[in-house]
Amino acid sequence: MREEKTEMSEDEDRTVDLGGATSGGGGGVFHETSSNKTMSCPLPCPDQVLENVLENVLLFLTSRRDRNSVSLVCKSWYRTEAQTRSELFIGNCYAVSPARAIERFQKVRSLVLKGKPRFADFSLVPINWGAHFSPWVTAMSSANPLLEKVYLKRMSVTDEDLDLLANSFPGFKELVIVCCDGFSTSGLAAVASKCRQLRVLDLIDDDVMDDELDWISCFPETGTCLESLIFDCVDWPVSFEALERLVATSPSLRRLKLNRHVSLGQLHRLMVRAPQLTHLGTGSFSLLEQPAQEGQDANLSQVFAKCKSLISLSGFSEIVPDYLPTIHPVCAKLTSLNLSYASINAEQLKSVICHCHRLQTFWVLDSVCDEGLQAVAATCKELLELRVFPMDAREDGEGFVSEVGLLAISQGCRKLRSILYFCQQMTNAAVVAMSKNCPDLVVFRLCIMGRHRPDHVTKEPMDEGFGAIVMNCKKLTRLAISGLLTDMAFNYIGKYGKLVRTLSVAFAGNTDMALRYVLEGCPKLQKLEIRDSPFGDSALLSGLHHYYNMRFLWMSSCKLSLQGCKEVARRMPHLVVEVIRDVEGASEDAVEKLYMYRSLEGFRRDKPEFVTIL
Amino acid sequence: MAKQGLELEITELRLGLPGDNCHSSRDKNEIKKRVFSEISVDDDQNSSSSSGGDRRKNQNNNNNNNKTQVVGWPPVCSYRKKNNAAEAETTKLYVKVSMDGAPFLRKIDLKTHKGYSDLAVGFEELFRSYGIGGMWKDSESSEYIPIYEDKDGDWMLVGDVPWEMFTESCKRLRIMKRSDAKGFGILQSKPYSNGEKQNDLKI
């Protein structure tokens, strides 16, 4: 399910993308190039029967990694695979051009496109950097009218793009837009009014501008086949009558996530219309418009009780914690609960969490404190994913959770697979305990918000804790480290982190050796993002053997020089080496931000002024 | 109000610091540049590392213990930060922004911006495809100038008054083509008639 894909860690994605490169070497990239040359000379197919059989078999093959392997067998298999691939996954929109992708895969029904590096979420990538959807939608619109699904992450999307999309694909069914910007409610209106087969419209964490257009009322009045409508990030009011009518005339609707302009009273009415919902994101969970009528709480609770299929709850903006208990009737069935926009304390959490025995995914604010996490640990034995976000996102802010909460979770939630934990202080002991108690961990992201902060009890670096994680969690594929860390931590990662694909580093390490350990030791490394760490040219050059196997490398505020980056560019012709200069008056030779990625296309023509491609 | 310091030429729209009785012979370019460079210096003092892409600066912490805030740290995505800030202070200050040549109107929340250079980044973001970058840095050569309508209905050049005063008095914003501005006498010492201007500006 799309929604689960975005809620779970990004590392759920497979690693190999269109470049075709596998960890065995850079062969995939070069194969792609040579095969394309062959494709342009049509050859008679020697064995039509075999190809037909293959075609039918390949229809069952959905994993793109498997498909990439199939395409390497021989030219005939390559062709057949290309003709039967229905989902095209492009992990880096600049790794390949739309034309080339479409030429190879002509019958694609679903397109997944990812653009900007993840550090763009933290304002490290200047606006106008790129990742435009336009060339893709333009190329697709003329070449492939059968397109039904588009999934975009960190792309720049315009209203014109959305309009073109709405006009070009008559059978269009699913649009999922995550962490994108550049479009407004006008674009949404175009999609709503023109995509008559639309089943899914999911807008997640986007920055949507207001064009003063009530896009909800642009859906056809006679009804829709919508199954999923997620718009909590579209922070502009919509007409409630239009929304209510939409919900009432969309009998297939299962997932609905409202924005905070929908009041609790309005939510009540919508839920009455749609008791079949499985995923609900409330709007504002605050005071009802009329003065509290007697039994109104009870009414809301009853309405929740009538939603017998509800398994996922989120939203709760502007929460008045007194209303939280109205969700009691659904707690026992919930598998996913997102309270990360609700500042509630431990007591308030306890009253609901004690019923949530089946919870698998839980996102929460650290306002619930260690005590709240202890309550989670006591009840949620099936927990697979936990995210604890900071209410006060400042380095020197107040910390509400600590190693106590982490330890409790590790003891209570043994099946844990994914954790993201923000805190102000931590100990190695707690992290080591988690590594032993939760051996199934696939994703471990610990963010100690104070830079260079050691174990607050022993005053030692956090090396041993993270070392234990890579050592004991044998399935680990994604890791984010923080706190005071020496080269030793990286030594551990290089030595034990054999399955690590994504690594995030900030304010860590002492010398170039640290980066070398990782580049030399982690064969599966795909995505490496580093900031404010003392790694220089020699470390950068130690990874040349591996960069073609990676999706990207990001390094900012490290110790790189132009010379070193030029050297990399010189020796690796299929690597695009971008130097981003958005700070005025910086020295010509220092490289403040480096972003490099493999690509079949060479340097991109849409690069802005502040980007230099070496 | 915003007019103190302009004295006799109280309704005249000039490019220059308030209270600066510049003679027509003086180099107006010089004055303009000083205004904008002063703005950027002020903001630099507020953030430890300037970054063109920093749309949502970390909230400045007065109890900083001398540790400067760093861009993008802790790594909480801007969407979430915006929400937390919104929860904290739900008062918003939306004003409409129009741009000559752009077919749409946008809204901008002045409360989410900390100063003029932050606002400039906001403008760039809103109208990026129309290429107004450089409007602030090098105002001489830029095709556009930003003006705003204040409480009294007068159109003023953005940047003349202190930021807080601006947010209190600004009713709407417009990014106007420099060529149009010349026609309206903004660069000359003419008395400024509001009624006339409203029609000419075609809002």
Image (spheres, coloured by chain):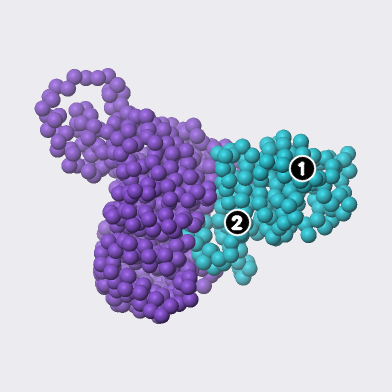
| Residue placed under numbered mark 2 in the picture | B94
The answer to whether mark 1 and mark 2 are in CB contact below 8 A is: no
Compared across the picture, whether B44 is left or right of A471 comes to: right
Q: Chain of mark 2?
A: B
Nearest the viewer among A3 and A553 is A3
**How many numbered callouts?**
2
Local crowd size for mark 2, using a 10 Å CA cut-off: few (<14), some (14–19), many (≥20): some
Q: Which residue is mark 1?
A: B196
Residue at image position (53%, 42%) is A128
Extreme residue toward the front, this view: A222
Badges 1 and 2, same chain: yes
Q: Is residue A256 visible in this depiction of the protein? A: yes
A564 or A408, which lies in front? A408
Residue at x 34%, y 64% (from the top left corner): A271
Residue A192's spot in the image, x, y percent? 40, 46
Quadrant of the rendered image containing residue A416: bottom left
Sequence-first disc among 1 and 2:
2
Residue A484 location, x and y as percent? Answer: 47, 64
